[in-house]
Image (cartoon, rainbow, N blue to C red):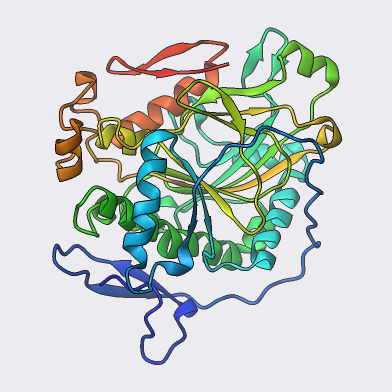
Amino acid sequence: MLRYNEKIDCVPWDFRLVDVLQCRSSITMATETITRPESLSIPKWSQVPETKHDLDWADLVTLDLGKFDTPGGKEELAAQLFDAVNRIGFFYITNFGLTQDEVDRQFSLCKQVFDLPADEKIKYRADLENGGYNGYKPLGTREVKPGIRDNTEIYNIPKFTAQYEREHPAVVKQHWDEIQHFAKYIHFEIVRKLLVLFAIVLELPEDFFLKNHRYEGKSDCHFRYMKYHRRTPKENTQLDNVWVKGHTDFGSLTLLFRQPVAALQVRTPEGEWKYVKPYPESITVNIADALQFLTNGFLKSSIHRVIAPPPDQAHIDRHGVLYFVRPEDDTELVPIKSPVLERLGYDKALDQATVGLTAGEWVRARVAKNVSRQGKEEESIIKGVKAKYYD
């Protein structure tokens, strides 16, 4: 039985993060003691009002993670997940254990990071051209159409282990303990539950995906602050209102904390674009490339894009707090053995080019290619494996 809220030595569960070790029939637990840090004073974050426009919202499954540790809860959640992940690759989670105040504080820190002077932020620039994503991605790095550059700023914080130590701006260092607690909570108390659910869906041992998503392992999991700068009406017209073309993410999962600016859309199997509704106190989760490769297309790497917000939100900069889950770098992206995949005919590699390709190679290649990409519908990434982009 995998238990995330176990009390150890009479210490309350939220002061421990559980490290799940490899074992087929049961899961042995080790612990990492992390004391919830005192909160330093920061500007209060207030979410902007939701749009009043009647948009075409996607019909997505919502998983109540509060059920995970109840009798039969994991099985109930996995059953909910089964159809969603095979069809569209997007879903919501609620009751994941972080308070709205904790989430809002991360949005406040996000704003503070991007409010720093440009000459300060550039000191921490990521090595994008060589596939490095940790650190700062400046505004306008990529030309999206002739004369128009991208409108995103990104600050990625890698896993809090010695091998990923790097310099950060003063505002990040001042709140380091709080950011670390938040990011590690996501990984240990949310992501791991989701990985267990995927294993149950595939009728595999519960720890199957935990073994190649170890926190201490080498991988590009990271916590992200992001800002989409508002565009002028003229720019939006030139871009056909599309800020980021339809694409898939690189790793295993992406977690997006609720923010109310309506701009994210998901592509349905029928090829229609539907808005992803920002439900209160939820996280939007989407499946990414690695899980699609590993399940030969059964788990769908969701196609999504970002467009100009509706008129009543067009004047607002869109801030984001996200967590990206990536398998360990040496994970080979070939179909795994699963009773479900065998029964449904997903047990043979559709793309032989992925044989021998590792998760680390795929992520670094996609990051490097993304820096120079301009308006392409399909692009060869590495070893003949391609990525598609959609209007």
Q: In the rendering, at what x and y percent does residue 374 appear?
A: 57, 12
Residue nearest the viewer, comparing 218 with 323: 323
- Asked whether the viewer can see residue 109, the reply is yes
Q: Is residue 48 left or right of residue 133?
A: right
- Which residue is at a point 61% across and 20% down the rendered structure image? 142
Residue nearest the viewer, comparing 315 with 300: 300
Q: Is residue 286 left or right of residue 103?
A: left
Q: In the rendering, at what x and y percent does residue 108 appear?
A: 73, 56
* Quarter-of-image position of residue 385: top left
Q: Quadrant of the N terminus?
A: bottom left
* Quarter-of-image position of residue 162: bottom left
Outermost residue, top direction?
A: 146
Residue nearest the viewer, comparing 165 with 249: 249
Q: In the rendering, at what x and y percent does residue 255 appear?
A: 51, 48
Outermost residue, bottom direction?
A: 10
Q: Is residue 148 left or right of residue 219?
A: right
* Quarter-of-image position of residue 41: bottom right
In the rendered view, would you say 69 is above or below 78?
below
- Which residue is at a point 49% across and 37% down the rendered structure image? 133
- Which residue is at a point 28% across and 50% down the rendered structure image? 201
Residue nearest the viewer, comparing 381 with 280: 280
- Which residue is at a point 36% across and 60% down the rendered structure image? 76
Q: In the rendering, at what x and y percent does residue 257 appear?
A: 60, 51
